[in-house]
Amino acid sequence: MKPEQMELLLRDCTLCPRECHADRLHGKKGYCGMGSTVVAARAALHMWEEPCISGRRGSGAVFFTGCGLKCCFCQNREIAIGDSGLEISTERLADIFLELEQEGAANLNLVTGAHDVPQILNALEVAHQKGFELPVVYNSSGYEKVETLRLLKGYVDVYLPDLKYMESELAGAFSHAQDYPERAKAAICEMVRQTGPCEFGEDGYIRKGTIVRHLILPGHTRNSIKVLEYLHETYGNEIYISIMNQFTPIYHQENYPELNRRVTAREYEKVLDAAVELGIENGFFQEGETAKESFIPAFDYEGVQTHSKTEDRVKIRKGENKKE
């Protein structure tokens, strides 16, 4: 991406559906909480994605600080609200991609990076010039603008979006985004258009395609079944659907008491039964104790900090500490 194009996108930011028009280029922060500099909280092999993404090798996950959605139940809230992370240069981000490849990652997993798409594209271009070859996974809340996704065409091999809500009332209550269903549906349509049907290598890892995740919320199985109905009726076996029961009630909700518990086994079985009745064949479900805080990664800057003495100063956003 040309510097002038990136500057234009950040000077009047409309990268996500919030369209806050913040001048991020000159010190203003967008709805996402971020300025023009990339902030990341972790870059390491991640073992807890779907089997075709993590497998035995692990997915090279880069967790970007900031988010344009900010769900009240977010398990990654520490970074979603911008409280944790290191400011890094585009060059450092490109090096991180290369380092994850050298560590044996099966793919590069960009986690919630919609607000950093211009910088990510530049970092990918630099990395590719240095020999980077991993498949790129774009891991998203689903709350995306089609225009921004089109910038990613040719750079992203696998899309991994959520489809959280089909009920706009829930989207407004839990994520302050009543337009989430229509935005996410349009975004997933563009993702599938770019990737086509899912394709896998002989090693079982996905090489291209779209996997849509849905996290069941306690007390809201009707919304979940509507999500499955929409996805299957629209895409059939062209996509994979990942049905997740790992909702973790980390933050007490006074206004939404139903969110102060985990999803019950009966609720999960109800949604899985619906998936079977619908005829969904390509999908994933979770077993065991997935609703544990221990499944949430530690945002301790692993893999983000540099060991180079020539690296420019990076600022630790959490507290007032700085590292030279």
Image (tube, rainbow, N blue to C red):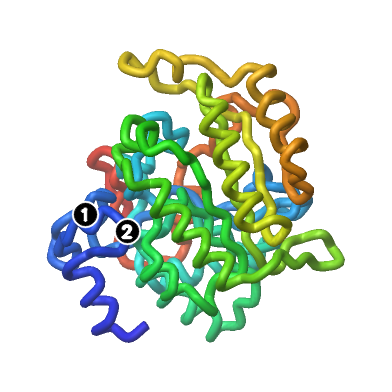
Tell me the residue at 41%/77% (across/down): 122
Residue to which mark 2 is pinned: 16
Type of amino acid under label 2: Cys
The location of residue 25, given as percent across then percent down, is 18, 68
Which residue is at a point 14% across and 57% down the rendered structure image?
28
Q: Counting other residues with Cα less than 10 Å from the Cα at mark 1, is it few (<14), some (14-19), or many (20 or more)?
A: many
Residue 270 location, x and y as percent? 68, 24
Residue 254: percent from left, percent from top: 32, 14
Task: Give whichever of discs 1 and 2 has the lower sequence position.
Answer: 2
Of circles 1 and 2, which is in front? Answer: 2
Q: Which mark is residue 30?
A: 1
For the residues labelled 1 and 2, say whether their Cβ atoms are less than 8 Å apart. Answer: yes
Q: Residue at position x 50%, y 70% from top?
A: 95
Q: Is 208 positioned to the left or the right of 122 in the image?
A: right
The percent coordinates of residue 92 (x first, y second) are 42, 68
Residue 306 sits in which quadrant?
bottom left
Camera-side residue of 196 and 276: 276
Q: Nearer the viewer, residue 69 or 33?
A: 69
In the picture shown, does residue 35 fall above or below 322? below
Name the image quarter holding the N terminus. Answer: bottom left
User: Which secondary structure, mark 2?
Assistant: loop
Cα separation between marks 1 and 2: 10 Å
Relative to 16, is 127 above or below? below
Q: Residue furthest right?
A: 202
Badge 2: few (under 14), some or many (20 or more) residues near its Cα, within 10 Å?
many
Q: What SS does tag 1 mark?
A: loop
